[in-house]
């Protein structure tokens, strides 16, 4: 039984890792794009983007996932995600990426706005464009400022991957929980906690090293 449980939990942990990695790969660049929208000089765009961010941050990720997966079929009469596990997985990634992109965008915006305005003025005096000022002067300082809050969100993402089970994506907790019904045992569910602790611990160490590398900006 132990070997069977270990096999299922390992399979589930790989799916959890896949959700985690794909979410970060999609949410970080999308979050930066959303940041530029929320800081745009065009008032209509700025207000629209910030309203969307407010909705996403103010509602549960589980609700958003349910709406993303079931909404198109119920409202438009068409399942845009496709059938089977692949379709459910694509819907999960889409919901996770957009949710975390909105959270990341606020962290990015806070980091950008926290950099003194004088650095923009100095760059303009040197004849640099706004693009050059951002990438050559402000970017590394921005990274230093956002690492701690980004780290918190990344650790939260590790645990939020469990929400994928509401649309029957077989992640870590889903595979641990099913033994309650099939075998009448609960200890596999507690073992999932060890996987999460190990995952979060490794990320904490990695993020700590990144902060240390960027300490020269003090």
Image (cartoon, rainbow, N blue to C red):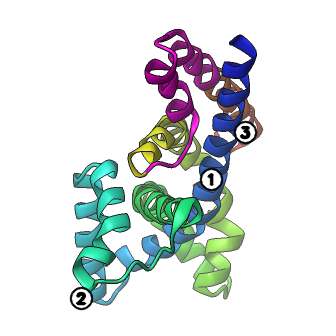
Q: CA distance from mark 3 to mark 1?
A: 10 Å
Up-down relation of residue 47 to residue 143 (above or below): below
| Residue drawn at 41 percent across, 55 percent down | 103
Q: Residue furthest front?
A: 182
Q: Which residue is mark 3?
A: 210
| Label 1 vs label 2, nearer the camera | 2
Up-down relation of residue 158 to residue 166 (above or below): above
The mark nearer the N terminus, 2 or 3, is 2
Q: Are marks 2 and 3 in contact (CB under 8 Å)?
A: no
Q: Is residue 125 visible?
A: no
Up-down relation of residue 159 to residue 43 (above or below): above
Q: Nearer the viewer, residue 22 or 87?
A: 87
Q: CA distance from mark 1 to mark 2?
A: 28 Å
Q: Is residue 158 visible?
A: yes
Q: Quadrant of residue 218?
A: top right
Q: Which residue is mark 1?
A: 143
Q: Position of residue 71 (x, y in %)?
A: 28, 71
**Dot 2: within a 10 Å radius of its alpha carbon, few (fewer than 14), some, or many (20 or more) residues?**
few
Q: Is residue 193 left or right of residue 68?
A: right
Q: Position of residue 58 (x, y in %)?
A: 22, 53
| Residue drawn at 42 percent across, 43 percent down | 163
* Quarter the N terminus occupies: top right
Q: Which residue is mark 2?
A: 44
Q: Secondary structure at mark 2?
A: helix
Q: Position of residue 72 (x, y in %)?
A: 32, 77
């Amino acid at each position: 039984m132990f070997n069977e449980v270990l096999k299922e939990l390992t399979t589930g942990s790989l799916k959890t890792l896949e959700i985690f990695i794909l979410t970060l790969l999609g949410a970080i660049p999308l979050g930066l794009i959303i940041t530029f929208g929320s800081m745009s000089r065009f008032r209509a765009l700025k207000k629209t983007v910030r309203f969307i961010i407010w909705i996403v941050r103010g509602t549960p990720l589980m609700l958003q996932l349910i709406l993303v997966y079931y909404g198109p079929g119920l409202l438009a009469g068409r399942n845009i995600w496709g059938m089977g596990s692949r379709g459910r997985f694509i819907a999960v990634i889409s919901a996770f990426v957009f949710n975390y992109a909105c959270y990341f965008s606020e962290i990015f915006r806070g980091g950008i706005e926290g950099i003194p305005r004088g650095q923009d003025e100095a760059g303009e005096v040197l004849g640099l464009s706004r693009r050059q000022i951002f990438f050559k002067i402000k970017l590394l300082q921005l990274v230093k400022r956002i690492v701690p809050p980004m780290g918190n969100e990344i650790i939260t993402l590790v645990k939020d991957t469990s929400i994928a089970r509401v649309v029957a994506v077989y992640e870590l907790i889903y595979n641990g929980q099913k033994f309650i019904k099939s075998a009448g045992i609960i200890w596999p569910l507690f073992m999932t906690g060890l996987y999460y602790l190990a995952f979060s611990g490794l990320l904490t160490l990695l993020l700590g090293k990144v902060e240390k590398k960027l300490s020269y900006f003090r």
